[in-house]
Amino acid sequence: MEYFNDNDQNGGWGGKVTFECKNFFLTLAHLKNIPENIGTPYKAGDVVGLVAESDKNGGWYEHLHVQCSREFDRERDAYSKIYYGIEKDFLNPFGVI
């Protein structure tokens, strides 16, 4: 698991947590709290983070960013333009969770 805090208020991530799962990476972003148990496995019911207010989440409206990808790249996100093969890079989260 990696925790990253991007304080850029012009489209940054805010708090961002990426979990390495069996065959994909799960990223949750625009969070306001730093997880206390970094490196410790989470179990069902554990709170990973809370949705941050706009002034702490990169300047976005309040929402939770959920992203599944096959490779870990801190700078890459699923907001890019649609391209041939995008489904190979970004998984449908409903198919893996």
Image: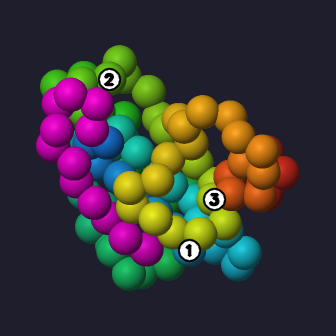
Local SS, label 1: strand
Does label 3 or label 1 sit earlier along the sequence?
Answer: 1
Does label 1 or label 2 sit earlier along the sequence?
Answer: 1
Q: Could you tell whether 45 is left or right of 59 in the image?
A: right
Nearer the observer, disc 3 or disc 1?
3
Q: Mark 2 = which residue?
A: 60
Label 3 – label 2 distance at C-alpha:
22 Å
Q: Mark 3 = which residue?
A: 69
Does label 3 or label 2 sit earlier along the sequence?
Answer: 2
Q: Position of residue 80 (x, y in %)?
A: 54, 37
Residue at image position (47%, 35%) is: 64
Q: Is residue 61 magenta?
A: no
Residue at image position (28%, 60%) is: 4
Q: Which residues are magenta?
A: 1-12
Type of amino acid under label 1: Glu
Type of amino acid under label 2: Trp
Q: Residues within 10 Å of mark 2 (few under 14, many from 20)?
A: some
Type of amino acid under label 3: Ser
Q: Quadrant of residue 30?
A: top left
User: In front here: 39 or 18?
Assistant: 18
Q: Is residue 33 above or below residue 58?
A: below
Q: Are marks 3 and 1 in contact (CB under 8 Å)?
A: no
**Image quarter (top left, top right, bottom left or bottom right) of the N terminus:** bottom left
Label 3 – label 1 distance at C-alpha:
10 Å
